[in-house]
Amino acid sequence: MTVRTRFAPSPTGYLHIGGARTALYSWLYAHRHHGVFVLRIEDTDLERSTTESVNAILEAMDFLGLSYDEGPFYQTKRFDRYREVLKQMLAQGHAYYCTCSKEELAERRAAQEARKEKPRYDRRCRNRPAPADVSRAVIRFKNPLDGDVVVNDAVKGRVTFANDELDDLIIARADGTPTYNFTVVVDDMDMNITHVIRGDDHLTNTPRQINILRALDAPLPVYAHIPMILGEDGARLSKRHGAVSVMQYHDDGYLPEALLNYLVRLGWSHGDQEIFSREEMTGLFDIEDIHRAAASINPKKLLWLNQHYLKTLPVADVAQRLRPFLVARGVDPEHGPQVDAVVELQRERAKTLVEMAELSRFFFVDEIEVTEPKARAILATAPQPALQAATGALEALADWNAAAIHDRLTAVATEYALPFGKLAQPIRVAVAGSTVSPPIDTTLSLLGRTRTLQRLRAALAFRAPTT
RNA sequence: GCUCCCUUCGUCUAGUGGCCUAGGACGCUGGCCUCUCACGCCGGUAACAGGGGUUCGAAUCCCCUAGGGAGCGCCA
């Protein structure tokens, strides 16, 4: 039997980090077993579902490279099928019409809560004959009254629920539209889903779904309820916790490789291994190795992984991804050194593409500004004669390369009895506009003779009026 | 309130009765390297929620307590 997994988001917002991990695990499990990964959009809540959300989710899946073999299927396009199953269940006595109004239900619920009871439907319509007018009635599932439902969860183990804890849930609204617990069951059945991997907030829904599946005489899938992801402070993830949207991470300069690696390790492990390529995780992933407890997000570790991939991915690849970030900062990547060479230099000092773009800006613009007070101070107190000598020496340099530049600067420093740093720092500020840059020789060689000399002269002039 | 789930360093985790005076990673931190910032390398810090059992032996098995989480919708 081929493994078939699915990811079934509801389009009521963007794809966040928790959903992405659920999708990843389902994707990995399907690929690991040469199975099929299905994408299904659960949009039966007409009020809250939007096409913008659908697009946002699709975009995020694409960014992460979580391709689906089937779908996206939309539940709103399957209403005929749901109606058909509803009709069948009614006919077979597995479901019944209920005419209790929302208000009545709310009243009874409040009363139950006041009595400190578990709020649940009292089944008063269960044994009544079907009402003549069905237009305002909902349809409820006739849950078994006694016995237990055992969920053999692949992550949590054997979990038992008593049927008398479960009430008769609504499977179709008064307007005829089906509800979640019913549509998942029908879809998982129709789509032959063999492994349901989802957040453990669904664990308590599972016995109801199993009961419906049994009423439909359908085989049960394997369930794997993975723990939730918590925010940094251990509280449930929410929009208030910052960049939880996958595409926000994209915008912040994170690589999908890093995100995937971070996510796969959040709740799953393979011994002490930390770094997993997509191929490795696909080959190694197993539900058995999923951790049972909730995990808190650790942004610093994600950052570390991101830099790891910036450092180890092919230079040309990183350069290609850096370009849009340069452009977004008003920089023309063609108006300066080879982006590949810049990446080579910056990737061990930047943790994100955003940071890399900002650190590299000075290579591509015509005019730089020195705004940092510390940088300005260095220019103001620079050893003028040495700086002048260095400018001259560089101007006279035959071959403009890092080694030659280094030789000259060392010679000038020695001549003026300066530690190398005393000469390198003012030059650095002059050309990069900052106290921080890659090594001065490689920086100058990449920047090019013209821009280097322009900026050195500007720096000398900057000092001139104040002397 | 009821039902269910969870509990190893700050965080992610290894660990499935002796290999554990509990390992790795991120972070933090001391040092080395050094023209700045980084990278890299070497070292340090820090945990089995608590209490009872079972056992020759328990992070690992059982029970209780505490704490955290989820569900209890004509949301998904």
Image: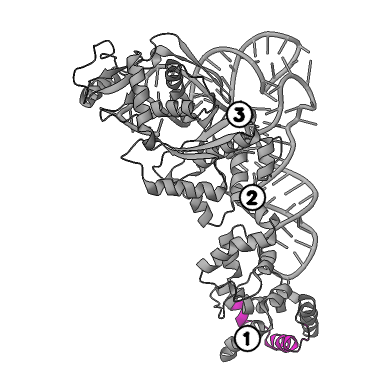
| Residue A135 visible in this rendered orientation of the protein | yes
Name the spot of residue A409 as percent of width and height, x first: 76, 80
Question: Which quadrant of the view contains residue B24?
Answer: top right
Marks 3 and 2: which is nearer the front?
3
Badge 3 amino acid: Thr
Q: CA distance from mark 3 to mark 1?
A: 66 Å
Badge 1 amino acid: Gln
- Which mark, residue A454? 1
Sequence-wise, which precedes: disc 1 or disc 2?
A: 2
Return the residue nearer the eye: A110 or A198.
A198
Sequence-wise, which precedes: disc 3 or disc 2?
A: 3
Look at the numbered discs 1 and 2 and tell me whether their residues touch, using CB distance below 8 Å: no
The subunit carrying tag 2 is A
The subunit carrying tag 1 is A
Looking at the image, residue A392 lies above or below residue A178? below
Badge 2 amino acid: Leu
Name the spot of residue A33 as percent of width and height, x first: 64, 32
* Residue A186 shown in magenta: no
Colour scheme: one colour
Q: CA distance from mark 3 to mark 2?
A: 34 Å
Q: Determine whether the residue tagged by mark 2 lies in a helix, strand or loop.
A: helix
- Residue A226 as seen in the image, left or right of residue A216: right
Per the image, the residue denoted by label 2 is A305
The subunit carrying tag 3 is A
Name the spot of residue A175 as percent of width and height, x first: 26, 30
Return the residue nearer the eye: A340 or B55.
A340
Per the image, the residue denoted by label 3 is A2
* Residue A384 shown in magenta: yes
Q: Which region of the structure is painted magenta?
A: A377-399
Sequence-wise, which precedes: disc 3 or disc 1?
A: 3
